Structure formats: structure tokens, C-alpha cells
Amino acid sequence: MMKNRLITAAAIGGALVLPVAYSTLGQVPAAQEHSVVLMQDSEDLGTREKPVPLGETFDVGEDWQVSVVTVDSNATADVLAENQFNDPPPAGRQFVLVRTTTKYVGEETGSPGFDLTYKFYGSKGNTYTTYDSDDSCGVIPNPLSEVNELYPDAGGEGNVCFAVPADQIDGGAVIVEELMDMSSDKSFFAIE
């Protein structure tokens, strides 16, 4: 007996779904659907080699879910306009402004500005912090540090900023880690 096969595929949430319907020629089509789900290998997601895509949420440590929402790789004018006392970045650098969302999923309370550390991973392997004098941006718009204490399932959004050499921005990433969780791995987030 000859069978017709209809195979369609759709990507849904990082998985490939292949529903397959079979019908026998000469008979009333009997629709049977079998789904095969091929999951994306997420074991190495969040590493330097496979950073979390821009806009996706990722578990950082045991208590946080973080997303890098937007990245302005040349925010110098915006940062300088935020406060008249802000200095321009050192020669050869530009301000990189990162908008991030955080959600506390722990059992007590957390403060993203204190519990999480952010670094910029440059394309040549150097890292840039939010607190080193050469890497700091000064006063920035909507800083993440102003998000108050969060209780379980509460979230906040704000900016972090880095002064990064212009030749290390393309191909760079944002590193986020939970400060007080010594078992926490660094999580890398794509900037584009």
C-alpha cells in the first residue's frame, strides 16, 4: 500500500517541531500526528562561545533571572548629557550603555545593584567594569543600582555602563554573575 507523507516543520521557542501526518491512498484520510522535538543544545548557553542572545532571559546564579534588553554601543552623548559633571571617556574609548532586566527568584530578598556584577568582555579578551575609574561612565540614565530591594518574583530594569576601547566593542559580550554565590558561573550575554 502506498502512503502519502506530509512533513512540516516549525521552530518554536528554540525547538524544532516536526508534526507528521499520514494518510493512505484510496481511504478516508486518517489524520495522525506525531511530533518529534529536537531541543537546542543549551548546555553551553551563556558561555563565551555561545552567549545568551540579546533579549533572552537566563538564570544567573541560584537567585536571579537576567536579560540584556538593549545595548547602545556609542552612548557617549547620552551619558555626557545626563550630568554636566560627567567626564568624556578616556581617549580611544566610548561609553557602552546596557539596558538590563532582572528578576529575583530566591527565597528572601535581593538587590540587583549589589547582588549582581556586570562586566564588558572585549573582543580581544579584556574585561571592563562599572567601577574602575578608567571604565566608569559617571552618572548614567536610569541606573540599575537605583532598583530597590526585590522580594521573590519581583523584577527591576535599569542601565549599566562601561567605557570600552572602540576596537573591542564589536564581538564583545556582557558578563553577569551573582556576587555572593561562589558556585555561580559567569554568564555571557550577546550585545547584538
Image (spheres, grey):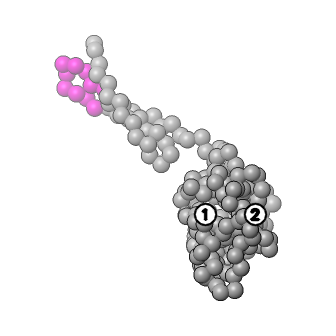
Residue at horizontal 28 percent and vertical 32 percent from the top:
31
Residue at horizontal 71 percent and vertical 65 percent from the top:
93
Q: Which comes before the other along the chain, label 2 or label 1?
A: 1
Residue at horizontal 39 percent and vertical 36 percent from the top:
9
Q: Quick check: 99 left or right of 21?
A: right
Q: Residue furthest front?
A: 91
The residue range painted magenta reads: 22-31
Provide the residue designation for mark 1: 73
Q: Quadrant of the N terminus?
A: top left
Task: Give the label on residue 165, or none.
Answer: none
Camera-side residue: 136 or 68?
Answer: 136
Residue at horizontal 60 percent and vertical 57 percent from the top:
191
Q: Quick check: 189 left or right of 131?
A: left
**Compared with residue 94, is residue 59 higher up or lower down, i.e. above or below?**
above
Amino acid at dot 1: Ser
- Residue 22: image location, x then y, percent: 31, 26
What is the number of callouts on the image? Answer: 2
- Residue 178: image location, x then y, percent: 73, 64
Amino acid at dot 2: Tyr
Camera-side residue: 66 or 73?
Answer: 73
- Residue 127: image location, x then y, percent: 76, 59
Camera-side residue: 172 or 50?
Answer: 172
Number of the front mark, 2 or 1: 1
Q: Is residue 30 magenta?
A: yes
Provide the residue designation for mark 2: 128
Q: Is residue 69 magenta?
A: no
Q: Quick check: 157 left or right of 125?
A: left
